[in-house]
Amino acid sequence: MIMKSITLILSVYKKVRELGILLSALSRQSHKDFDVIIADDGSGEEMESFVRNYKSQANYSIKYITQEDLGFRKNKILNKAVASSNSRYLIFLDSDCIPHKDFIKAHYENSGENLVLVGRRVHLNKKLSDELNEELVVSDSFDRFYIKALGKSIGFNNPVSTAEEGIILKNKTIRKVIGRNMRIVGCNFSVSKELLYKINGFDENYVGPGIGEDSDVEHRLRLIDAEFKSVRNLAVAFHMYHPKTAESNTNYDYFHNNVKLKKEFYCTNGIIKA
């Protein structure tokens, strides 16, 4: 089996249209040495059928893993994806985030052994999300899509949030300023598999959205002195609109009352079970 330089892990649940647009955008990536794992939290037959058909036409390798739908168990399926990956370096992206053509390149060129790379996303409104399709994201027009987002970022009629995150900035001085105090966002970050295994991956005690797939992981990576570096305005992604997800209060309680107080970097309910 040929080992790729990077594995892109895509977390998905039910969003077949969005995943199709994302997979199409990946066909145009400037960095070609990657494979994809679709980590599906139990979407069902429609998703399985879609991925099965898509794999036959993709110009990159796709592995599909899923689990029974027993509620929000994103961390569990992410751990399965990490364990089944063949690359030394992993990028995490949500299925409703559509990457710029240099997205993987930005993560690859800035990666390092003890580094965690953290990016951001443009929050599209519904109108611009509806404009995205598989044909658009493989065209040169998508390279300028951030201009549309910027044009919709002002006013009171459902403006685009964080449109400035779509601008590619390569000036090192500017990047040093805008990259301060960056935190992990679960939809756009990358890390070596070795670092993830040191903390035993994602803590499956988190059930429901919020904290478990980003803040908790960041906290435990910092406990082992991992370094954090921004790829903001380099690894650009456009987040397709959906109503705001209600986060779990139980997760917040678990994080603050257990993880932060104990200051233990290794979770017992992770990739490797205690």
Image (cartoon, rainbow, N blue to C red):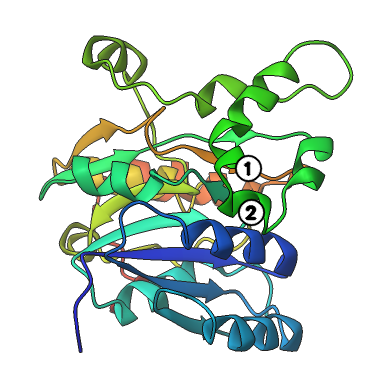
Badge 2 element: loop
Residue 204 image position (x, y, % from top left):
46, 68
Q: State the quadrant of the N terminus.
A: bottom left
Q: State the quadrant of the C terminus.
A: bottom left
Q: Which residue carries the number 1 mark?
A: 239
Image point (65%, 66%), residue name:
20
Q: Earlier in the sequence, mark 2 or mark 1?
A: 2
Residues at discs 2 and 1 in contact (Cβ within 8 Å) = yes
Residue 161 in view here:
no
Q: Which residue carries the number 2 mark?
A: 96
Q: What residue type is labelled 1?
A: His
Alpha carbon separation for disc pair 2 and 1: 6 Å
Is 14 situated above or below 84?
above
Residue 248 image position (x, y, % from top left):
65, 50
Image point (59%, 41%), residue name:
142
Residue 194 image position (x, y, % from top left):
16, 63
Q: Which amino acid does label 2 sit on?
A: Asp
Q: Nearer the viewer, residue 92 or 198?
A: 92
User: Are there few (<14), some (14-19), or many (20+) residues within 10 Å of tag 2?
Assistant: many
Image point (78%, 44%), residue name:
131
127 relative to 223 in the view: left or right: right
22 relative to 205 in the view: left or right: right
